[in-house]
Amino acid sequence: MIQSTSQKPIAFFEEVATYNESNILLFISEYFPTAKINPPFVELSEMIFDENANPLEIINKQKIVSFWSSILQGELYKSKELIYQNYLKGTESQNKVYLNVIFNTIKVIIKKGEKFTLNPSCLFFLKEIIGFINDRLLLPDMSPFLWESLINKEEPYLEGTNSSHKDLILSIFDYMEGKNELGEQILSKDDFLLLLKYTIFLVENQSVPEIQKQLEPKLKNGIISFSYWVLHKELYDSKKIKDCFIDFLKKVFVCFKGNEISSIRSQFGSKTRFYPPDFLSEIIKKYSS
């Protein structure tokens, strides 16, 4: 079992987000070595004995759920304390980055945890962590972290999109819905949705969409360019860069408007133009490290 630490204060929740019922039963059985876990969770009227004629304790569903909830409650308290102690050690600018890292980590946890334990309690405890940050640690110039932004259903225009493309695009660019290393909102909600719409069109049509509005994410050019190189790499795994990706950068983003096509192409995929910050998506970090 992974334990939350000072370096990773919500590591426990990162692990249990992927637990299914079997994982949980295995975990709990270590606490009750002489017990019989009753998988169907049916109350048994007869006594159960082991091979030495010793009575076995029957662990039913109610006891499992109660015990598991108590574990999550303890881990919640531990995570809050670790987050708070780290916060006290940081400067204001460091804490802005730190709180955004915690929020983005929770975002990743929710996306990969399609089934949360025996009930939705894991979601409840993650929500409690965000509430703790908003109530106790938020700096005066920071906007509250919105739980609703993590659990909202996808926008209508994403429906019907090839699922592999949709999932890939979201896994790469979801960080643009959050904040940069200075605590600035990278893109507004509307602009983030517009970015997804543009990018889906690019991938599915291999051409640049009609641009309703140019976008100005609060990011360095190198991060934007590298993000789209990762998309290109995941889709095509080819050294030959498709022209539509270069045209897309120049036409969609204000920061590339004055750049020559040859310059954008020569820097496409370069890791020397930026130092990968913690708020980037995991799939980008994989290529930038």
Image: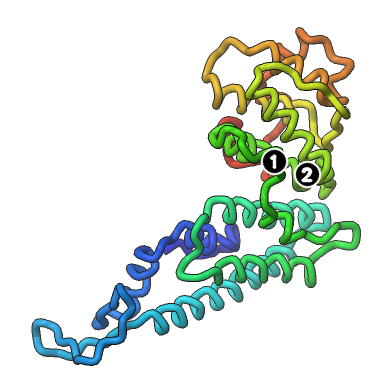
What label does residue 277 carry, if any?
A: 1
**Can residue 284 be seen in this snapshot?**
no
Q: Is residue 52 above or below residue 190?
A: below
What label does residue 95 carry, if any?
A: none
Q: Residue at x 53, y 58 (%)?
A: 14
Residue 35 spot, x, y in % from top left: 26, 82
Can you identify the residue that label 2 sits on?
180
Check disc 1 and give the amino acid type. Answer: Pro
Q: Earlier in the sequence, mark 2 or mark 1?
A: 2
* Residue closest to the eye, 43 or 11: 43
Residue with the most extreme top position: 262
Residue 74 figure quarter? bottom right
Residue 157 spot, x, y in % from top left: 71, 38
Q: Residue at x 65, y 72 (%)?
A: 81
Q: Is residue 192 above or below residue 124?
A: above
Q: Quadrant of the C terminus?
A: top right
**Can residue 252 be seen in this snapshot?**
yes
* Residue closest to the eye, 2 or 65: 65
Residue 256 figure quarter? top right
User: SS of the residue at dot 1?
Assistant: loop
Q: Is residue 272 above or below residue 32?
A: above
Residue with the most extreme left position: 52
Rendered image coloring scheme: rainbow
Residue 125 spot, x, y in % from top left: 61, 70
Q: Which of the two marks, 2 or 1, is nearer to us in this view? A: 2
Check disc 2 and give the amino acid type. Answer: Asn
Q: Residue at x 44, y 61 (%)?
A: 19
